[in-house]
Amino acid sequence: MKDIKVKIKDRFGVAHLLDAPTDMAMNIMELCKAYELPVEGTCGGMAMCASCQCYVHSNHELSEIGEAEEDMLDQAFFVKENSRLGCQLYISIEMDGLELELAPES
Amino acid sequence: MFEAGLLKLRCHLIDALPYSGGQCAEIYPKKPIYDIPAYPEILAGDLIQNLEQQIEPFEPTYTLGERAETIDKLADGNFKVTTNKGTEHTAAAVIIAGGLGSFEPRKPPISGIADYEDCGVNYMIKDPEIFRNKSVVISGGGDSALDWTIFLANVAREVILVHRKNEFRGALDSVEKVSELAKKGKIKLITEAEVIEINGNGKVESVIVNHSKEGNIEVSCDYFIPLFGLLPKLGPIANWGLEIEKNAIKVNNALDYSTNIPGIFAVGDVNTYPGKLKLILCGFHEATIAVQFAYNIVNPGKKYLMKYTTVNGITGFNGETKKAEKAVVKSI
């Protein structure tokens, strides 16, 4: 399985082009933490804190928003139409070239 | 506390939450964890219960619902930790196992909201009586917002619940009750809307609600109660003179997980060092090492001998020993 490229813009507007493995069952929150981007992942990836909220800027077809994620996005701040929780986006080959932006801290 | 107990060190736990367990107890008690050794799967809440049971022989004492606010080094070398309620504790060594910090209400990003805190903006409800015959705007869509809307409907003169969506995701029973109260006119619901501004003169007088279709609406009120759950913040620990890096306390992981202040250790998610992994498993290891060094501070010059529980079992502070029966299991 090959790595894919994911572009993530941090909260200062700096874009980071990251190599993301597709064979580690990793999610975007874990990827951000692995590259030391400022994502807390407070709840450990259970869609319960929104510290990994990001905005999806590319047109990739991503997994459907699940009930837990929708619950959390209901409570979070700075939520937009393209908001997703990084912890619920599992890295797959189809996500090659994905472009995301970290939502402000709240 | 268990490892400290084995070394005959008495521990006192201070926690801002009304119970021990931190994130596991507060955020995800019903979620399974899969990476605790010997537990293929365990609920976070059950893990905490097991840990509490495990430390019972060592008679831990607790100050719960109070946040450790300040720490002072006393002339005799001990530390005095004072909570936000003024409770003081003195100890020779302090181990900070504060996770990501103490849980504080999640505050909406409304400009100037801090100016109205305790002047009409309340993030939690301690005494519902202050809302009697007052006009209250509640914001949020979870259980807490729904429950307080139901409760205050019988206390306040007027309750207005503002929520970003047109559906609520709290307990079904609560959602139905809120819907019923709205139909009866006992409360007012403004959905697909957010509070974006607070107006007043030293005290809340109105809020501006941005509605997705109707635009901005000014709503007069005496109180604004945003209920968006809790969020861990490092809080007062950040002012203790400890070296902070990446919003965590820097420790010496090559030796004892000590901070830059001798006698203060930091373990678990609250600390940082090269190669740090924020895992419960690693927190157990760090705490075990830290208490061995805390032993030397509590008992200077005393020879320390590590003990295996498999050899002598566990002797609690009441003198009772829990150990396996001796039995010949194999003839040689």
Image (cartoon, coloured by chain):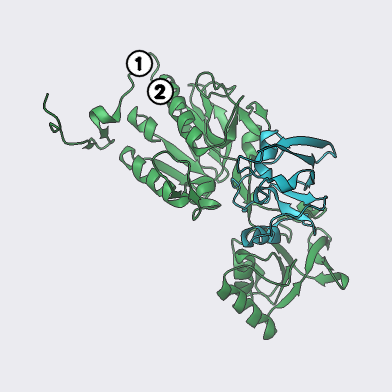
Chain colours: A cyan, B green
Residue at left offset 60%, top offset 66%? B143
Disc 2 and disc 1: Cα gap in Å? 9 Å
Query: Which image quadrant: the N terminus of chain B?
Result: top left
Would residue B92 be visible to someone looking at this image?
Answer: no
Q: Residues within 10 Å of mark 2 (few under 14, many from 20)?
A: some
The residue that mark 1 highlights is: B302
The x and y percentages for residue B64 are 48, 47
User: Which chain letter goes with mark 2?
Assistant: B
Lower sequence index among marks 2 and 1:
2
Asked whether the beta carbons under mark 2 and mark 1 sit within 8 Å of each other, the answer is yes
The x and y percentages for residue B290 are 47, 26
Instruction: Find residue B51 and report its image quarter.
Output: top left
Q: Nearer the viewer, residue B64 or B53?
A: B53
Q: Residues within 10 Å of mark 1 (few under 14, many from 20)?
A: few
Up-down: is A36 above or below A92? above
The three-letter amino acid code for the residue at tag 1 is Lys
Residue B295, numbered label: 2
The three-letter amino acid code for the residue at tag 2 is Tyr
Q: Nearer the viewer, residue B2 or B122?
A: B2
Q: Is residue A47 left or right of residue B281?
A: right
Residue at left offset 34%, top offset 22%? B306
